[in-house]
Amino acid sequence: MGSADGFLRIARVETACRSISTRLTDFNQVKRDLTEQQIAEQSQRCMDCGVPFCHMYGCPLGNRIPDYIDAVAHGHWQEALHVLHATNNFPEITGHVCPALCEASCTLAVHFDATTCQQIELRIVEHGWEQGWITPQIPSVTTGKRIAVVGSGPAGLASAQQLRRSGHEVVVFERSARLGGLLTYGIPPFKLEKWIVQRRIEQLRSEQVIFETKVHVGTDLSLGYLAQKFDAVVYAGGTPIPRDLEIPGRGLAGIHFALKLLGQQQAEDISDHQPAVKPINPQGKHVVVIGGGDTGSDCIGTVLRKGCASVTQIELLPEPPTERTLDNPWPQWPRTLKTTTSHEEGGVRMWSIGTVGFSGSDGHVSAVQCVKLAWTGNSYRKIAGSEFTLKADLVLLSMGFLPNRQIAEFLEDTDERFHRNIFCAGDAQNGPSLVVRAINSGRMCAQEVEAFLS
């Protein structure tokens, strides 16, 4: 490593954020990246720990984190980029939106502040773009094989790039007008600006990956058709069905799935033409977000920027502890209280709250009916007499997504001879998960296709 005792001499530097008063006026990136000089210094903190849990345990991609940090520590930035790209197609994307699983399992994190793995990763790849080191990799030999990829989210894009670089013709089918899946339509630009996604898509175009937008596989084209016309099909259609609440008052106007709001906002930011539907307008409204995960947090940041009167986020589960508990030791992911930049900007958070109904007037929601819960282990009970209501002109449902049944239903309903060349990747295979896991799944799926074709 650059310095065996660097972590004792050099303090971890956190990424700074724009002031709340400033960032609430726009949808631009909230966090400011560390400088190249800061990164060079931070790379000295990575110790020669012998067993790098960041690489072996934490990172779903298996990024060789100690190797690229060591390269940076010695000023070998191009080597660091090569090491990083060996396992990760889109490190600038994971550098922005990954929850830094590697840092949670860093050996330093047992008693010290973890190495700034994520910011080092991000600076390496941005330095590579600035230096012109990241260029299209067009295969010198073509195989004559044709691959269809369904979905242009992180799993689909990673799989498409790997297969194209192996010399196959790759056609990506995307149902939306823009490419990128949830990278484009789900994650707000204050976390991931869209030019970052577009830059990688342009690289794939230059590598001669073919993109077909506004094509809904399952409606416009069937999986069976693709299985017959292509040598292999990679299904990376994600998990598009959100969890719903079947409770009294659900049919009232003003109750929406979170991704409807987020998708409309992203479409507005990228000037994407949307169907003639009435947009969700949080301005001046009392908003209740049901669900305490990242998507709910993204809703908070969005409605605050759109001028809501108030926003309250309610979560079924109890409030997490601020420190690790005995049953959650390092190097496991810490199940502790997480406060996002959106939470810092405003709103109220409530835990152990059950939603029992909605009430309204003139067909529009006006309140959420709630009850407090008491948890014992993994089960809960409603606390008698704890019922209360929250004022709500707009309710956003952010409770996760259901597993994708489209591929399973296709396999159940069709002849087995169409099954052998269909492969699955990302959330469509594993259920809702992280971008970093989707990229890894896309890469692994590409390996399976390669083995099949050979």
Image: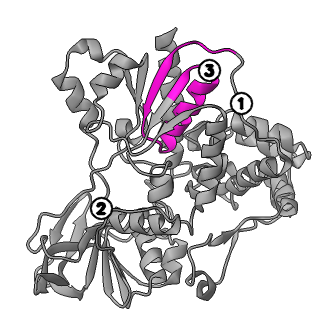
Q: Answer left or right for 313 relative to 377.
A: right
Quarter residue 228 falls in: top left
The residue positioned farthest toward the right in the image shown: 75
Name the residue: 17% across, 78% down. Answer: 371
Q: In this figure, what is the number of numbered marks? A: 3
User: Is disc 2 surrounded by few (<14), some (14 to 19) or many (20+) residues within 10 Å?
Assistant: many
Vertical position of residue 443 compared to residue 404: above or below: above
Spatial CA distance of label 3 from label 1 is 10 Å
For mark 1, what is the residue? Answer: 137
Please tell me which of labels 3 and 1 falls first in the chain. Answer: 1
Please report the bounds of the magenta region as a residue range: 141-170
Q: In the image, which disc is placed on residue 399?
A: 2
Residue 144 within the magenta-colored segment of the rendering: yes
Question: What's the amino acid at mark 1?
Answer: Gln
Q: Quadrant of the N terminus?
A: top right
The amino acid type, in three-letter code, at marker 2 is: Met
Q: Is residue 276 above or below residue 231?
A: below
| Residue 109 in view, yes or no | yes
Question: Residue 399 in the image: x percent, y percent?
Answer: 30, 61
Give me the C-alpha separation between circle 2 and circle 3: 39 Å
* Image mark for residue 166: 3
The nearer-to-camera label among 2 and 3 is 3
